[in-house]
Image (cartoon, rainbow, N blue to C red):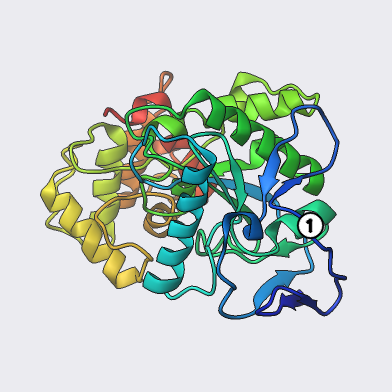
Amino acid sequence: MARDYVSRRGFIIGGLAVVATTGALVTTGNAWAGEPEIIDCDGWGARPNSDIVPIWNQRPVKILVHHTATPNQADVSREAADRLARGIQNFHMDNRGWLDTGQHFTISRGGYVLEGRHRSLEVLERGERQVEGAHCTGQNVVAIGIENEGTYTAVGPPTVLWNRLRDMCAYICNQYDIEPTEIFGHRDFKDTACPGDVLYGMLPQLRSEVAGVLGQHLTTRVAMKESWPLLRVADQGPAVAAAQHLLRDAGMTDVQPSGSFDRTTSDAVRQFQTVHRTEEVNGMIGGESWPLLVRAVAPGEDGEAARAARVLVEAQADPVGPGAVSLVGAEDWRRLLSTPTSLVR
């Protein structure tokens, strides 16, 4: 795949002409009345990117929803939104050593939508290419990343933030011909709690609302989407027991398949993550570790992986006999793990 680059000053080198931005507040397109207004990088006082920003000659195929894991502050002013954007950029550049803000867009608790990484807005307006991000390893050239200010582990986002997130996702889907079903959470691809349990649980609603804005309709089943469960200390259920069997299959034999995610299990996960050099070594099993843990299971097979599969099959509402278990790949495992009975929290 070919790609162009954005210079340190922000001009595109290669195949894209420069689009001038004239003010702090940029209104994108006119597809529908609820279209979001987006504050560009100049508008919130961004620093220059420290190196060229790659732009890929391809359209993104999905959207990743994040939360900033910052306090759910009461200040919902424009000034607070600008400070948030500057703080994120400073952290990403100074602490993580990145060339710019990692995500493409940020939404404040006051409902202000801000461009994150330079030229993300300009390229989105054209709807043909993608600015390479740094919001999720493995997804940065195929997914648009949106950070939502706050921590949404125990509470949901403010209505105004939610509405802007819906409108922004609809605009991105419209520009790039992305299906609303292709809206994911950060944890779908990494071992992280992001975007928080509550906001992650609202993603089926987000997909449905985005579809509605685009004049589409999603059934509940389609909007739910199969996903890897996030497992942490104190979780219980068949999904935990299956993970414990799979850890034993991977050589972590100190783990006992009790169905309760204890400290021994967490330590084993950390060891597994270290061996496989995952991005996070945090003892949680999410969208990065699951695909590394699971493997194909043949009918009639015995052993730890087969026992993991049987635990999940037997937890189904209409279980089948153990001899019928046959899992070809990760998609089969994810389908089993997506069932409501697989995890108790």
Q: Quadrant of residue 229?
A: top left
Name the residue rendered at 74%, 53% in the picture: 23
Q: Nearer the viewer, residue 251 or 160?
A: 160
Q: Is residue 330 above or below residue 3?
A: above
Q: Nearer the viewer, residue 160 or 181?
A: 160
Name the residue rendered at 68%, 29% in the picture: 210
Q: Nearer the viewer, residue 313 or 324?
A: 313
Residue 333 location (% of width, % of height): 46, 44
Name the residue rendered at 66%, 20% in the picture: 219
Badge 1 amino acid: Thr
Residue 17 location (% of width, % of height): 88, 70
Residue 299 location (% of width, % of height): 44, 45
On screen, residue 111 versus residue 155, left or right, reads right
Q: Which residue is mark 1?
A: 22
Report helix, strand or loop for mark 1. loop
On screen, residue 265 versus residue 30, left or right, reads left
Q: Nearer the viewer, residue 251 or 135?
A: 135
